[in-house]
Image (spheres, rainbow, N blue to C red):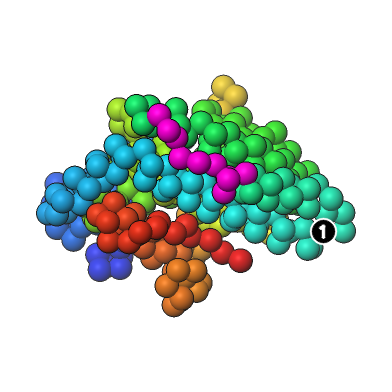
Amino acid sequence: MRVPLNKVEQVIIFGEVTFTTPALHALLERRIPVHYLTAHGRSRGSLLADWGKNSGIRLAQYALAGDSTRSFAVARQCIAGKLLNMRTLVLRYARTREDASILEEAGEQIRRCLRELARLDPPTDTSDRMHGLGPLLGLEGSASAAYYNTFNQILKGTWNFPGRVKRPPTDPINALLSFGYTVLTNQIISMIHSIGLDPGLGVMHQPGFGKPALALDLIENFRAIIIDSTVITLINTGQIKADDFEEDLGAFRMNDSSRRTFLEKLEGRLNEEIRHPHFGYKVSYRRSIELQARLFAKYAQGEISDYPPFTVR
């Protein structure tokens, strides 16, 4: 299949694939990112064009990361957006189930976590920024546990979801979630990079060698409404089945056919338009992610006084 370069937004490579140097040059000249993943769907790295020329954005980002009060405010908004969107997804499915008690209780537990989240004060000890985030992360963990506990009620058929298991994914549902989160994280890294921010320094996730902490911060608002909803739709409509997975030493991965199905569905989801909760006009989910990165940059530079989360109803 031949696709014009002006129609290409990104290239995702699985396993051992060889690119010619002219092809890579053409992609870089057009600022088209190339993401390399293992056959199991884990990220190997990305080939990106040069950073934005505005180093002032990164200086502001580094200053924000060192400001415990302001970084706490952004981290709280990242978590608040995540919890609100998880609750929205759970309650949507509760309306379609005869016995929705588990879903409704999860929605209530997430609401309680949101209430506690709003009451938390910024840390008084500014010497250890990550230690001050402990209460925030604790509430996120409690809400996430309640949220994932609903999946066996949401998913149709005989699928069994044991809870979130990451490395390696030990069942098909976790394989889908991990793969989706990896693909979306790589897209967010590209957006962060193009704006001129440093993907490795966030406010919520601990920085580490090779860890895209800021991308992991920004993905939180979009996990449930983009990746999780895509996984649920594919399962409940029968587009992905149990025999679409391969098991290797207890780790599950999708076969080529199901991976292609997933990426097509994800692309469609990213191109869906919604009314932006902050700006009020219609944008795609893909554009919404970029706008969150730009709002982060504006907050870091002091151009806006608050960093708003991205939420849907």
| Residue positioned 38% across, 27% down in the render | 128
> Residue 226 placed where, x, y %?
53, 56
> Residue 295 placed where, x, y %?
34, 59
| Residue positioned 25% across, 68% down in the render | 6
Which residue is labeled 1 in the image? 97
Question: In this image, 214 relative to 246: left or right?
Answer: left
| Residue positioned 47% across, 57% down in the render | 309
> Residue 68 placed where, x, y %?
36, 38
| Kind of residue sitting beneath label 1 | Arg
Secondary structure beneath label 1: loop
Check the image and name the residue furthest to the bottom.
281
Is 305 magenta? The answer is no
Q: Evaluate whether residue 138 shows in this view.
A: yes
> Residue 204 placed where, x, y %?
42, 39
Q: Quadrant of residue 70?
A: top left
Question: In this image, 202 relative to 51: left or right?
Answer: right
- Quarter of the image containing the N terminus? bottom left
| Residue positioned 46% across, 76% down in the render | 280
Q: Which residues are magenta?
A: 116-125
**Could you say which is closer to the camera, residue 255 or residue 230?**
230
